[in-house]
Image: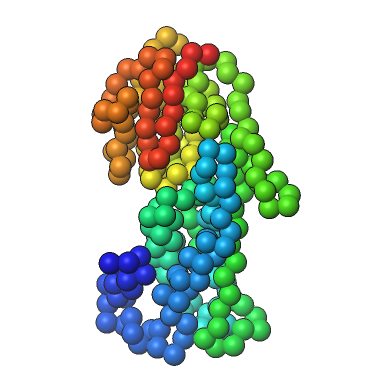
Amino acid sequence: MSVLQRLEKQLEGLFEGTFNKMFKGVVHPVEIASAMQREAETHKAVLAGGRVLVPNRYVIDLSPPDHDRLAPYAAALAQELAQSQAEFIGENGWTVYGDVIVEIERGEGLDTGMFRVTAEVAALNEGMDQPVSGGGYGPAQQQAPTGPVLVTADGRQFTVAHGATIIGRGEQAQIRLPDVGISRRHVRVDFDGRQVSVTDLGSTNGTLVNGQRIATVSMQPGDVIQIGTTSLTLQAG
């Protein structure tokens, strides 16, 4: 079953018997999702290490009549579209910064049944690749090592702070990684001044250390954490 087929099935379940009635005569969510996929394809950018970055923020402008009709369902629809786009991005092995976000807005001047999709890379947190003017992407910012550091395959460095550090894709993580295979709160790294340990936080895809799936384990310099498609090598500061 394709991503678009799954989206339609999920929407049918969400809105039960009202799905066909709700979207009859107005723009269909699958058409919007297909346009979002094309936007991701169009705006691909290759980062260091061969990773492919695509937009994570999508703004959907609907015609005033369509927007007014779908307004009561806009939040639920936006959430389903975001989930569908995240699945599409993940299946292609692409990278995004943080979560996929969809916003549905009123597009003045659009005729009924018409819509417009714009896509962009949302503002990023410190310590991640930052976009520069002209549409390119600058080199990864690196934190000055003051203790143990985790180093990605493409050379990004993240200092392991004293205490607990959450690594994940969501806003609550201290180290945010642009990898859709990583959960919002994926792992916790603990450092007591001498020993580093890593604990999986019930992530969807699990955590590997040196190729072995773990729940919690102590680490030594040279050990490699694998989460999603991202590897992090522990090095002494």
Please determine whether, in this image, residue 93 is positioned above or below residue 219.
Answer: below
Q: State the residue at coordinates (43%, 36%).
A: 230
User: Which residue is at the far bottom?
Assistant: 25
Q: Tell how many labels.
A: 0
- Give the quadrant of residue 115: bottom right
The percent position of residue 189, horizontal first and vertical second, equals 40, 25
Residue sticking out furthest to the top: 194
Q: Is residue 3 left or right of residue 137?
A: left
Could you say which quadrant of the image residue 190 lies in? top left
Q: Is residue 130 left or right of residue 113?
A: right
Q: Image point 43% across, 61% down: which residue? A: 85
> Front-most of 235 and 114?
235
Viewer-side residue, 106 vs 219 = 219
Say above or below: 137 vs 221: below
Residue 146 falls left or right of residue 232 = right
In-front residue for pair 99/171: 99
On the question of residue 98 being in view, the answer is no
Q: Quadrant of residue 22?
A: bottom left
What residue do we see at 29% from left, 72% from top?
Answer: 9
* Rendered residue at 31%/82% (across/down): 18
Percent from the top left, x then y, of residue 149?
A: 50, 21
How does the figure colour the protein chain or chains? rainbow
Q: Is residue 118 visible?
A: yes
Q: Quadrant of the N terminus?
A: bottom left
Above or below: residue 220 compared with residue 10: above
Residue 154: x percent and y percent?
53, 32
